[in-house]
Image (cartoon, rainbow, N blue to C red):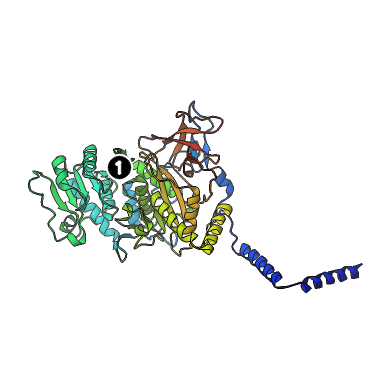
Amino acid sequence: MLDTLLLRLDESVTGLFGQWNLWTSVIFTVFVGFLTYQIATRQDPDTHPFLLARQAQGSPVRQPGESPVYRSQGAPHGMPLNASLNVKDPGASKWSRGRDGDLRDVWRQAVAGVQEDGPTKGATGRILTVLGTDKTVEHRLADITRQINLIGQHIADQGGNRVAIYLPNSVELVATLFACAFHNLTAVILPFDEPSDAIISMLRRSAADTVVTAPGSFPFDVVVKNYPTLRQLIWVVDEGSKHMDWNEVPQGTGSSVNVSTWQDIINDGPVDAGKELPPREGQKEPRDITVFWKSKPGQQEEMVRFTSANIISGIAAQIFAVPTSQRMGPSDLFLPADSLANTHSLVLTLAALFSNASVAFNSVASQADDLTIATRGASPTILVATPAALLKTHKDSLARVNSSLVARTLHRLQVRKLTQTGAMPVANPAGGKLRLILTAERAGAGTPRLSSAALADLRAFTGARIMYALTAAKVAGAATQTGFYDYRVVEGEQGGGCHFGPPLTSTEILLKDMGAWKTGEEGSRGEIIVRGPCVAGNEAALGVAGMMRDDNTLAYV
């Protein structure tokens, strides 16, 4: 019996190799290559699928005409929402609970460096200004601290109270914001590059008495004629215009505005003045920050006042939204390619400073819906971008990929790996350092919407993870935001775009009945209501209808 079996085996093997030819070799090679590729490139999912299947927690009880109240899994019901930066003063026990903190603690942390024990202890980030493609200026943190002190003291000495900041993304914008926080002044951040009538309207509504701005962008003559309340103007002059006299008030205006330049204030101060930040003890809570929410064209901007506590809560939630191993740090270069007048970009920039990441400012980045222009001269690892800029990048990249069969095939394999196995490619296909892109839908502002398919393409094109948020006028930071490891593509998307993720740890969401949209057997639908410590007034109705999907993420109806 054994001999017979061995004989048949021998005849089978001989017959197989006797029929071997070129086509057999090709088929065998392709089969072995396919198995080798699958084994060599196999990756475990970046997160467990169960964590994506239920991303928020609904309250066990709901009120009539409302949905359950949904919260992040990181801030379950019965626990307070995230409102603290957990700031620990020098000498405090590492096990003790830290202070909630305020805006001044963000800059104190940026100057002090990393506090946790480890290889990066004491490391600080860099502050950069990108000037074109071949010049980058690095600003010493000590010099910025001196600017914060001298500018804040100058405004206070001149009787300033409410400071309007009308600047593109720049070091001076951030320094003025901190100067207001340290010297008990109210900061008013105006959207940049606005027409004269809009600037005057915002100055009147905010009752600003001081303006910090740049020559050529601020209509000084028109403003002083139509807004006599203005008492103080500080020009931020570039290097090529320092030789001109900017302190003179134009004749015929009849104005008593005190005009000075940023550079003169800094240079005229004593050499040793302003090097140390004011002590925390005995200082009052920083004043509110006033911002203007740009609505659809033709509509007046909505003015919103955020307390320091609102901003701090938004910062804390954005830091917590990123897994611990992936959080911002000294090795990151953060670039806001969206205007800092938007609280989403502002809160993320402050979070980067608090995390001791390096921050690069490009004055044209916030005005360009083109990532090539926005990132020119810098290689960021973390980028804040507008949906319009991402859609343009998606369109351009897709056109390049579709021109080549090989590129198109490789792109499809990458997208399939992202969406079906839940794993990002090991290396950035573009060879860059970019690892995270943050973007946001502006509720009610007519922002171009991103589909989940477009986001998947962009992740494959850039090699970076993308977090898509829903922002609103009265919410510091974001109301909801997609998960760091959520790469899924949603079939049959409603509302012209994908979902916006679950609430952050600083917000809770509920849907109130709105016309035909009601909570019932078909699910939770209605007007989106946001509550939490990062919300101005603690609650805001967004005026748009939303729905909670089966995975408890928020989407437009």
Is 57 located above or below residue 440 in the figure? above
Residue at figure coordinates x 10%, y 49% from the top left? 250
SS label for mark 1: strand
Could you tell me residue 185's position as x and y percent? 24, 44
Is 1 located above or below residue 482 in the figure? below
The residue under label 1 is which amino acid type?
Answer: Val
Q: Is residue 199 visible?
A: yes
Residue at figure coordinates x 50%, y 39% from the top left? 76
Quadrant containing the N terminus is bottom right
The front one of 540 and 29 is 29
Q: Categorize mark 1 by other alpha carbons within 10 Å: few (<14), some (14-19), many (20+).
A: many
Q: Quadrant of residue 479?
A: top left
Q: Is residue 158 visible?
A: no
Could you tell me residue 187's position as x and y percent? 26, 44
Residue at figure coordinates x 47%, y 55% from the top left? 458
Could you tell me residue 94's position as x and y percent? 43, 51
Instruction: Answer left or right for 25 relative to 164.
Output: right
The front one of 229 and 332 is 229
Among all residues in the image, which is located at the extreme top?
64
Residue receiving disc 1: 291
Is 218 located above or below residue 205 in the figure? below
